[in-house]
Image (cartoon, rainbow, N blue to C red):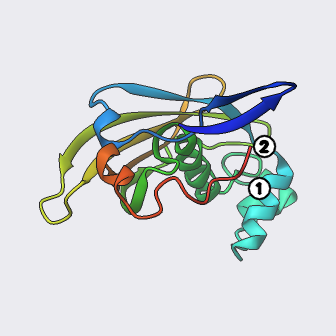
Amino acid sequence: MTGDVVSTGSTTREQRVIEQRGLYFDELEEGVLYAHRPGRTVTEADNVLFTTLTMNTQALHLDAAWSAGQPFGRRLVNSMFTLATMVGQSVSQLTQGTIIAQLGLTDVSFPHPLYHGDTLYTGTVITGKRLSASRPGQGVVTMEHTGRNQDGTVVALAKRSCLMWTKDAHARQPGAGEGTIPV
């Protein structure tokens, strides 16, 4: 939270400004389900663009005629798009400006396909957290992301670990709070 001086006619006052951010290590609660909204409806354009940008020539993502003859009967959304979107949906609520580094992803699975027109909803449970022994003011947070389609069917799962700031340590960093966009 920062203050900006605001002039309105003959009055000058400091206005409270609340900047959107993720949660600090100290604010994350184990066992809590963080529901990330809004959902993201995936389009054919999303799938084709992501697939071609990443040079993934898998016909299951690009070739409707060929995919029609495969077990699912239609094209599938690229699973890496699903994973990236699932993690991305968590950023504004959990890690925006409070993460130092993503340490890893494990146990990634896609138990059901995501199709064009499906909406992806993600929830995250914090499954563990510990202060770093070697990095004062920082901690390792483990989280489990679950992606579901509009029907509630689980389409993706992933365990993720991140190095996160504690609130006080981040505030003591040189330049903390600088570089924000003026309002």
Q: Between residue 162 and residue 151, name the one nearer to us.
A: 162
- Residue underneath mark 1: 47
Task: Indicate the position of residue 92 as horizontal and vertical percent values.
Answer: 57, 41
Give me the residue at 59% from left, 33% from top.
18
Dot 2 alpha-carbon crowd within 10 angstroms: few under 14, some 14 to 19, many 20 or more: some
| Residue 1 drawn above or below residue 75 | above
Give me the residue at 53% from left, 41% from top.
21
Task: Indicate the position of residue 73 as horizontal and vertical percent values.
Answer: 75, 46
Q: Between residue 9 and residue 51, name the one nearer to us.
A: 9
| Residue 16 drawn above or below residue 131 | above
Kind of residue indicated by mark 2: His
Q: Is residue 162 visible?
A: no
Q: CA distance from mark 1 to mark 2?
A: 8 Å
Task: Indicate the position of residue 135 as horizontal and vertical percent values.
Answer: 20, 63
Q: Is residue 105 visible?
A: yes
Q: Between residue 145 and residue 140, name the one nearer to us.
A: 140
Task: Indicate the position of residue 4 as horizontal and vertical percent values.
Answer: 66, 39
Label at residue 116: 2
Label at residue 141: none
Give me the residue at 18% from left, 47% from top.
130
